[in-house]
Amino acid sequence: MTSISLTFPDGQSRSYDAGVTAAQVAQSIAPSLAKAAVSATLDGRHWDLAWPIERDGALAIRTLKDPEGLELIRHDLAHVMARAVQALWPDVKVTIGPVTETGWFYDFDRSEPFTPEDLGAIEAEMRRIIGLRDPVRTEVWDRARAIAHYEGTGEPFKVELIGRIPEGEPIRMYWHGDWQDLCRGPHLQNTGQLPGDAFRLMGVSGAYWFGDVTRPQLQRITGVAFRNRDELKAHLTMLEEAAKRDHRKLGREMELFHMQEEAPGMVFWHPNGWTVYRALEDYMRRRQRAAGYREIRTPQVLDRILWEKSGHWEAYRENMFLVEVDEEGAKEKRINALKPMNCPCHVQVYNQGLKSYRDLPLRLAEFGSCHRYESSGSMHGLMRVRGFVQDDAHIFCTEDQIEAECASFLALLSSVYRDLGFERFDIKLSTRPEVRVGSDEVWDKAEAALAGAIAKAGYPYELAEGDGAFYGPKLDFKLTDAIGRDWQCGTFQADFNLPVRLDAEYVGEDGAKHRPVMLHRAILGSFERFLGILIENYAGRLPFWLAPRQVVVASIVSDADGYVREVTEALVAAGLRAEADTRNEKINYKVREHSVGKVPVILAIGQKEVEARTVSMRRLGEEGQKVVALGEAIALLASEARAPDQRG
RNA sequence: GCCCCCAUAGCUCAGCCGGUAGAGCAGCUGAUUUGUAAUCAGAAGGUCGGCGGUUCAAGUCCGUCUGGGGGCACCA
């Protein structure tokens, strides 16, 4: 028997016979450790307690306290759920059941749909199974036996899964009691290690087998799971908190916007919402002008001929809104499309007049209104709409200018994100795909330029090789909001294709004509979506400069109405968005209503304020108030109302 | 687009097994002149998302369409 040496996290090593299991090792260290153990890691790889260890390595025994322990809980619950489902409906076929960020899901094949009521029955059955404390057993099978087994039990999805396991990988079978499943493992020692009160089934949905629309749609049951009941409760509370800041709910409550049946995926901005929109747009306009962009405006309805030239007609026609017009005297109907993007229009502007290398880089920006026929199932409040406006710009430049343009874009983007309250963002660099246009030399240059600019700015980035567009490499920017969710907003894409298709050129120093590179870029993405993100990030409590109503001046007694109007007018004259509230209501009522309405500042005016020409200032989220002289209050609020780029 | 769920007053929701709609808040009217998160009272408000079917009778059952939600797919 060969001997192997295992090193533990404390740096100590011990010898064991080859083939020893992690469970045996744990037992040799301490019986209490063996009892608490749920799995191990061997050289960093998650390792089942029952798998034999054949060679030297670094071994760490894991308990439920480790991250690996939580993963096991979720993974074993997936199996327990599959077992429960097959116990309740023996004809159901099982497929795959991976761990997710907060729990797991398992996809089933069954002709009858699962109902929400079924979930309760499944949960109860799962608890029963956990109570059985069945030991988990594992065996390695050879491929032919495993396939024969699942052909015998009529589980075609499992047969296909086995086919997808690479040669050389062990094919493992697990048993929870007498219930068997194919799984790469690892697993807990027994189902009794699962917390019966720390999971919940969340819902049923459809999901295509391997995400492929042409394959059967399976029924996915998802669940969330944690180490204990308190963590589950905390998670459910977090979900409730997230629901409270849902921009669709806040949009209605704050009277920001609405949508309706006649225009699915299109936004009706109300006065409050449009105020926020305009504040954001004005800010972006100033930032871009300061960064050397020229703003333009191009048509929304264009003949299909342009879309055929640009290539969009062929590739994206199904997602375009078409506009037909009966033109007088015309034999055929002319077909136009609402623009789904601005780039072809920007090339048209570029193409007016011969451009010299001295004109480059030329940065054309447009808050361009675009329409895309998004599939019905993909729309979601402001986050995914059919009519939207991008903070779009295209930079026409030479290959040599890409890096400098990328660098100044990075500086602008990070500054804008910081101004808007997002400190953290991640960058992804996507490089050449297999099918592409442009020479390798140009790709080399462009990829190096993007990578170089990020590196010089000192940002880390994730590399997605082969994920670039066919027309060029790109950067994607993902920001993280106040409750830890990620949103992909900014983008920076090099394009070697469109200048060729739409025949953009410039005269170089050599007097010859050359192709410019076109850089597509956006910081917010779409205003609609970004406003949704802002609303949720701030839970409706927008920063003062963005708040739709910045100040409400509320009377305490009707004798103060005249002064209230005077104060309000003075605030409006100072550029503030202020309203008077002289309704015949108690101050308690007004304070509550405007607090619920997320107004950042309430100025209450009673007899004392009238006499002293002061205001009683109350800020949202703070208790108590401060009495300030009128002139001082106006100066203070006017200063606070300045956008981040306008502060001294 | 696909799977499941949902649609009742401006908003949030109740309406058991089919017997011809109910609450709170908002809005309206009146009283109250109020000191920092809901003053009191009164009247009013709905072809129960659209269309079709079953039935003596449909908010309730069935079909279909539209829109929405949770996912899957999609996202130039």
Image: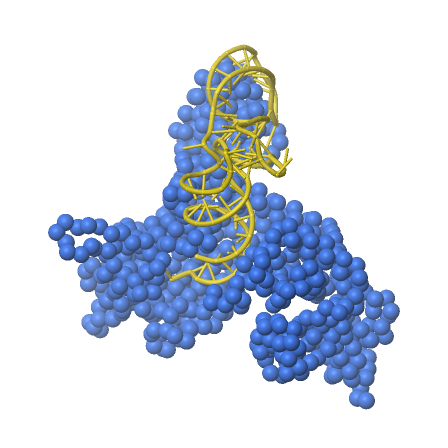
At x 71%, y 71%, the residue is: A180
| Residue in front for this viewpoint, B13 or A527 | B13
Question: Whole-percent x and y of residue A130?
Answer: 76, 60
Looking at the rendering, which quadrant does residue A515 occupy?
Answer: bottom left
Q: Quadrant of the N terminus of chain A?
A: bottom right
Chain (yellow): B
Question: Whole-percent x and y of residue A71?
Answer: 68, 64
| Residue in front for this viewpoint, A334 or A504 | A334
Q: Quadrant of the C terminus of chain A?
A: top left
Image height of A111 relative to A416, above or below = below
| Any part of residue A642 in sight | no
Image height of A113 relative to A548, above or below = below
Image height of A167 relative to A330, above or below = below
- Tell which residue pokes out farthest to the right in this image: A31
At x 76%, y 79%, the residue is: A52
**Image colouring:** by chain
| Residue in front for this viewpoint, A354 or A635 | A354
Q: Colour of chain A?
A: blue
| Residue in front for this viewpoint, A146 or A41 | A146
At x 48%, y 38%, the residue is: A252
Question: Whole-percent x and y of residue A430?
Answer: 45, 68
Question: Whole-percent x and y of residue A429?
Answer: 46, 67
Looking at the rendering, which quadrant does residue A158 occupy?
Answer: bottom right
